[in-house]
Image (tube, rainbow, N blue to C red):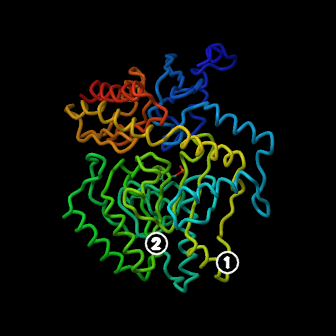
Amino acid sequence: MSERSHTAQGPTGRALISRDRGLLWHPYAPLNGPAPYAVAAAAGVRLRLDAADGTVFTPMDAMSSWWSAVHGYRHPVLDTALRNQTEQFSHVMFGGLTHEPAVRLAEELVRITPEPLQHVFFADSGSVSVEVALKLAVQYQGAIGSAHRQKFLALRGAYHGDTFAAMSVCDPVDGMHSAFPSLVAQQYFLPRPPSARLVDGVLVSDPAEVAAWVALLSETAARHAGELAGIIVEPVLQGAGGMYVYAPECLAAARRVSDEHRLLLIFDEIATGFGRTGKLFAAEWAGVAPDVMCVGKALTGGYLTLAAMLCSRAVADAITASPVSALLHGPTFMANPLACAVALAALGLLDSAGWQQQVAGVEKGLTAALAPATDLASVRDVRVLGAVGVVQLKTPVDVPALTRAALEHGVWLRPFRDLVYTMPPYISSPDEVAVIGSGITAAIAQVHG
Ligand SMILES: *Cc1c(COP(=O)(O)O)cnc(C)c1O
């Protein structure tokens, strides 16, 4: 990290924090919530943070800025891609215009995603891409003569975003539905699929539990088929709804049931996409291809906000042949050229840096470094899948205390509910992954015992 950040003119972190408080909302937090830390710099896998009490930390970013900064901060390749695009043009409308970054990125996404996905809609955030996927499913049903099919089957424990339609398919208890009773659409929910555990590279679950869940899925889909437009799930790993790993067989069953009732199967890979679970897309754990897929988060390597919704040719053809013919959405910043250009570079880096080896290395390191956490009295479960490590406690986490304790051990974390979790940047070295794992364990031991 450069010395300049230490001597930069302007407000210190402490002063910034006090100006922030009461002025700015932070995610899911009250205006007068716990003081944030101020970021003075970020490079590689490290942040430089100023605390409200004046302490300076330079922790590893164990969160990859919420799944996104997989190549680390200030990556020269991504910085260059962005700079080059600013010298062409930074933004143009996408109505009636097109440009090379959008076309090339769409071609690349079609190339790397499961075979049936052939068409791309660029959205400006993950939540919006989910809105577009749900709209697409409803328009598709209308196009094939089932306009009355407008509801969705979703999973308890799901997280699909914070806009209204996306919220409606989030877990109905944790998903803030009760705060907006007349605005959040009523959907149908299945219990979480049975949990799975990674054993020698295979996700293992209880076959009897899987059979029971699949029977419930079949029965629920059959009962509501006349109303349902689609099934939406985060494949294999539910993220912000509980960091929960489930049996891939359930996705194969969802594929069969979707085909049987002409439902669209939507995979939300916004968190799981681009290698995070150890497969390029989590769908590959089940060998199942969806009709519709959403990607975001790591798409731009964490540089800019961009998401995409992809769909199959059959779905696109049906909509194109319908009287409406268009997909009814079009954000101002659709296919922003800077975001597309940096996304192309980030996808290139996945390949050139060898994401498989990177993610396998993080998985191995987290498995070893988090194992001692199993012995802590406060810990209920420890699980690792790909470059994701989760320690679930028996009680809710004391978030401010645990965050601070982890910083003292050199790690930036953002726990929620009873979950202390990490998804490190793919570029983390074995030593850095070990620091994250031991920092998590030490912080939990210190705060929760
Ligand atoms: C983060 C996330 C979203 C929402 O994406 P935003 O860019 O925050 O709107 C949707 N689905 C999943 C699975 C996510 O992890």
Q: Which residue sits at x=39%, y=40%?
A: 360
Q: Residue at x 25, y 41 (%)?
A: 381
Give the label on residue 230, or none: 2
Check residue 325 in the rendering and tell me which mark sits there, or answer none. Answer: 1
Q: Is residue 158 above or below residue 62?
A: below
402 with respect to 89 (left or right):
left
- Identify which residue is drawn at 38% across, 43% down: 386
Q: For the residue marked with disc 2, what is the amino acid?
A: Gly
Disc 1 to disc 2, C-alpha distance? 20 Å
Quarter that holds the N terminus: top right
Element type where label 2 sits in the image: strand
Q: What residue type is labelled 1?
A: Ser
Query: Residue 326 lies in what quarter of the image?
Result: bottom right
Instruction: Establish whether ligand 1 lies closer than 8 Å to the Cβ of label 1.
Output: no
Task: Name the side, left or right, on which 233 lies relative to 90.
Answer: left
Does ligand 1 reach within 8 Å of label 2's beta carbon?
no
Determine which of the numbered discs, if any, sits on residue 201 in the image. Answer: none
Which is nearer the eye, 145 or 202? 202
Q: Quadrant of the C terminus?
A: top left
Residue 432 or residue 163, whichever sits in front: 432
Query: x and y percent of residue 429 in the render?
Result: 44, 28
Residue extending furthest toward the bottom: 145
